[in-house]
Image (cartoon, helix red, strand yellow):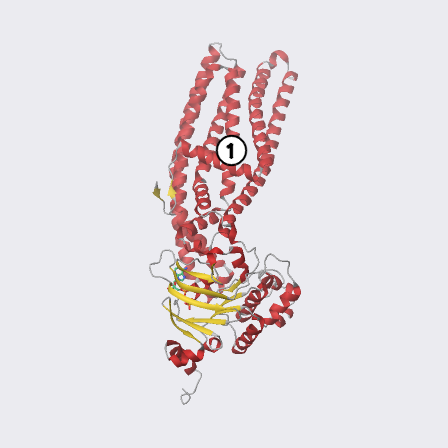
């Protein structure tokens, strides 16, 4: 297999692959909507029977018409009525099939999402650093809206076309066994050309995948709410639109060339089919002349041969659709095996009542990186302590916080909770024992109460505790003053919604951490968006709220850090210094230097 521009393997078309894809697609559809799928299959079989009956009814009508001079017009009424009725029932069945396929398609989408979410929410954070995992997740996610329908339609049209073809072949055989070779020949041109068309379509789609993704991304940049301010502030729209236009232009150009090539094959197929049809007519005339076939049966056979050609085309279209969704199914399949579900990551579990958490000689390297982000780090956080991490950008603070919170396993060394390695503790209990608010915390576009109550997602929200957490984070007043109080959606995307300022959002996130009521609280730059008064209040309230819990705080603000019980200074993934503010100032190392540098900005020259 050679890699495609999407990084996905470009599988060959083969009977073996087709049968595997058909099996997998059918299993997916069956698992999603058993009853509807069974009803749909039954309807396809009914449709096939109706088509065969239409051919026989056509023969009956033709017999009546040819005999009309002898028997009178009244004798044609019944066959015509039957043919009309059969046509009407076929149309009604078709419409019912349409509704059922839509329902089955949506059910397949849900099953597919369930499978994807089982994996993507079950795996550890480290998987998201792995490009193989993330690329596959991205591909599965971007195909999620269209592919399940494609799989469903492919399977259903194959079943329908196959059943109808069998019905038609049987009917033709009953009209005259001599027609059988003719039938086989009539299918060949359409089959060959549509196979070629399907190959072209497949290659075209694979070649377009990457650029289609880029187009979608540019569209998102140009229409996204979060992106709107930067796009305007930098005046990016002209530049981005030009890129999008160029991409679309190229796509349309290539689409035109592809459609012309496809159209050429289609024309050849249709011309050959017309030739075969002419041949069929001649054979029918020959059969009639020889007395082997009545005129009415020949007419019905002609109708059946035309119908069969359509069915062969539908069958080949169904196969093509299944091949086209094959890449998606492969991705889905690989995605499932790549990262088996890790149920222990779920939050369930009782918090651990610890005295100290110790990291000893911890090393951690991000996948795909050579340089270690943490290189032999040892830190200690005791119950009731506020410990701070400082250091320049990229020195490893956030990475250490993630390792301590059990989100990344250490490559080397150990994190222990009261001497027990974190890897030996139930992951659910570790999760329940930590409340982490990252620099780029999530602003949930949900109501204010939920934004805080999500700190304990498995519990029924407790309004009093939500308010207490909000008060501790000094955001209760602002939330109560919203138009619908705590029920106000914190986004303008929904009706009646209200947006907050950056600092207010940060307080909501801190309230979420407080509400979690975990014995270890990790706050990554909690005061970045807070004004100085709010920052001061946050730290006095943090001491109050902690009540015997431990807090790990990452901050670039030394006014915040100086109050911590212990400060670790990280430098290139190593602990350069540690101690209390006074100890570090006495040491007169990099902490003292950075502290003075920041203080200098506020102090008059004389005091410096
Ligand atoms: N997802 C990632 N994949 C690869 N490398 C990463 C990733 N995240 C961080 N790094 C690298 O790991 C090192 C430590 O990053 P980390 O985010 O822990 O630093 P930090 O001290 O928190 O920085 P800042 O003060 O800017 O927040 C840096 O060299 C960074 O480039």
Residue furthest toward the bottom? 606
Horizontal arrangement in the rendering, residue 281 relative to residue 542 (left or right): left
Q: Which residue is label 1 attached to? A: 157
Q: Is residue 462 positioned above or below 580 on the image?
A: above
Q: Is residue 88 positioned above or below 583 on the image?
A: above
Q: Is 83 or 12 nearer to us in this picture?
A: 12
The x, y position of residue 299, in whole percent, is: 52, 19
The local secondary structure at tag 1 comes to helix
For the N terminus, the image quarter is top left
Residue visible at 63% across and 22% down?
A: 82
Residue visible at 64% across and 23% down?
A: 81
Name the quadrant containing residue 449.
bottom right
The x, y position of residue 309, in whole percent, is: 47, 27
Residue visible at 46% across and 14% down?
A: 178
Horizontal arrangement in the rendering, residue 573 relative to residue 158 (left or right): left
Q: Quadrant of ligand 1?
A: bottom left
The x, y position of residue 540, in whole percent, is: 55, 76
Q: Is residue 290 positioned above or below 493 on the image?
A: above
Q: Is residue 140 positioned above or below 431 on the image?
A: above
For the C terminus, the image quarter is bottom left
Q: Is 536 or 406 nearer to us in this picture?
A: 406
Q: Is residue 245 visible?
A: yes
């Amino acid at each position: 297999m050679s890699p495609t521009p999407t990084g996905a393997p470009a599988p060959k078309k083969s009977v073996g692959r087709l049968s595997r894809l058909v099996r997998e697609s059918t299993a997916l559809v069956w698992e999603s909507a058993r009853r509807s799928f069974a009803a749909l299959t039954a309807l396809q079989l009914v449709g096939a029977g109706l088509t065969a009956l239409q051919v026989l009814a056509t023969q009956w009508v033709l017999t009546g018409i040819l005999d009309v001079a002898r028997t009178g017009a009244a004798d044609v009424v019944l066959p015509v009525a039957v043919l009309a009725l059969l046509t009407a029932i076929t149309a009604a069945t078709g419409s019912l099939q349409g509704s059922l396929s839509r329902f089955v398609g949506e059910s397949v989408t849900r099953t597919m999402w369930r499978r994807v979410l089982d994996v993507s929410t079950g795996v550890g954070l480290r998987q998201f650093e792995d490009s193989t995992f993330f690329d596959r997740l991205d591909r599965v996610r971007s195909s999620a809206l269209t592919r399940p329908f494609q799989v469903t339609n492919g399977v259903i049209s194959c079943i329908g076309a196959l059943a109808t073809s069998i019905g038609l072949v049987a009917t033709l055989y009953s009209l005259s066994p001599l027609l059988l070779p003719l039938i086989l020949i009539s299918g060949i041109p359409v089959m060959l050309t549509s196979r070629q068309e399907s190959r072209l379509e497949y290659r075209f789609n694979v070649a377009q995948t990457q650029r289609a993704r880029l187009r979608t991304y540019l569209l998102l940049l140009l229409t996204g709410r979060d992106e709107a301010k930067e796009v305007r502030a930098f005046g990016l729209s002209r530049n981005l639109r030009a890129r999008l236009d160029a991409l679309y232009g190229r796509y349309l150009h290539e689409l035109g060339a592809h459609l012309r090539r496809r159209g050429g094959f289609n024309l050849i197929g249709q011309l050959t089919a017309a030739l075969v049809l002419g041949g069929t007519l001649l054979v029918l005339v020959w059969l009639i002349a020889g007395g082997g076939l009545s005129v009415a049966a020949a007419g019905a056979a002609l109708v059946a041969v035309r119908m069969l050609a359509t069915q062969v085309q539908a069958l080949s279209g169904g196969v093509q659709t299944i091949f086209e969704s094959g890449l998606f199914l492969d991705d889905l399949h690989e995605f499932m095996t790549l990262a088996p579900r890790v149920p222990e990551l779920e939050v369930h579990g009782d918090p651990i009542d610890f005295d100290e958490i110790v990291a000893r000689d911890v090393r951690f390297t991000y996948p795909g990186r050579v340089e270690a982000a943490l290189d032999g780090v040892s830190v200690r956080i005791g119950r009731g302590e506020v410990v701070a991490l400082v250091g320049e950008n990229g020195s490893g603070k956030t990475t250490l916080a993630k390792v301590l919170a059990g989100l990344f396993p250490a490559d080397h060394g150990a994190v222990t909770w009261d001497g027990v390695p974190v890897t030996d503790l139930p992951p659910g209990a570790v999760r329940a024992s930590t409340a982490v608010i990252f620099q780029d915390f999530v602003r949930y576009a949900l109501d204010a109460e939920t934004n805080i109550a999500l700190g304990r997602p498995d519990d029924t929200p407790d309004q009093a505790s939500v308010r207490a957490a909000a008060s501790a984070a000094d955001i209760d007043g602002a939330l109560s003053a919203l138009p619908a109080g705590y029920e106000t959606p914190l986004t303008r995307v929904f009706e009646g919604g209200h947006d907050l300022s950056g600092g207010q959002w940060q307080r909501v996130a801190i309230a979420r951490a407080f509400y979690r009521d975990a014995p270890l609280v990790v706050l990554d730059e909690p005061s970045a968006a807070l004004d100085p008064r709010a920052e001061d209040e946050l730290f006095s309230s943090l001491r109050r709220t902690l009540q015997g819990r431990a807090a790990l705080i990452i901050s670039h603000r030394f006014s915040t850090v100086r109050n911590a019980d212990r400060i670790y200074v990280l430098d290139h993934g190593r602990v350069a210094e540690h101690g209390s503010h006074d100890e570090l100032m006495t040491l007169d190392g990099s902490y003292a230097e950075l502290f003075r540098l920041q203080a200098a900005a506020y102090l008059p020259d004389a005091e410096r």
